[in-house]
Amino acid sequence: MLLFADLLPAYLITGILVYYVPTLFFVRGRRTLGKALYQIGLVDSRVLNPTVARATARFAIFYLAELCLSLATFGIPYLISFSLMVFSKRRQGFPDYMLGLTEIDMSRTKIYKTMGEAEMDKINTYKEPVDFKVPNYD
């Protein structure tokens, strides 16, 4: 009986340390260590960085509702989430589907924190100045 009393807090603490704390450090894309290794980021429907509230909700849905509930119900929520990943168009898991989040390749796409930052990046693109010299064809 004492084993079960120690198992649940240990499972919760390790889940927080592995799945939630890295998303607070990797602000752009709200990544875990594995996603940081493979350059995968998380964006919302406007292709912006998810807020801390959305990252917390994603952790709560994934870890508490999906993984912990799967232990009690022989993996039914995990199977539902896995089948959603396999058979949906956008290949999203259940937490990402519920919150409207998408995983993208960060080596190809830049993730912005706000719309203002995205607009400033469009304005500040460096272009070569136009050369108005007439070529000499002598």
Image (tube, helix red, strand yellow):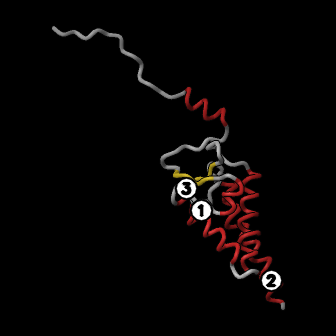
Q: Tag 1: residue type?
A: Leu
Mark closer to the observer (3, 2): 3
Vertical placement of 24 versus 134: above or below? below
- SS assignment at label 3: strand
Q: Position of residue 52 (x, y in %)?
A: 74, 51
Q: Tag 3: residue type?
A: Ile
| Mark 2 to mark 1 CA distance (whole Å) | 26 Å
- SS assignment at label 2: helix
Which residue lies under the disc numbered 1? 33
Give the class, few, some or many, for how many residues have Cα within 10 Å of label 3's Cα (few <14, many ≥20): many
Give the class, few, some or many, for how many residues have Cα within 10 Å of label 1's Cα (few <14, many ≥20): some
Q: Tag 2: residue type?
A: Asp
Which residue lies under the disc numbered 3? 40
Give whichever of discs 3 and 2 has the lower sequence position. 2
Which quadrant does the C terminus fall into?
top left
Q: Position of residue 34 (x, y in %)?
A: 57, 63
Give the class, few, some or many, for how many residues have Cα within 10 Å of label 2's Cα (few <14, many ≥20): few
Which residue lies under the disc numbered 2? 6
Q: Are marks 2 and 1 in contact (CB under 8 Å)?
A: no
Label drawn at residue 116 = none
Left or right of 116 on screen, residue 39:
left
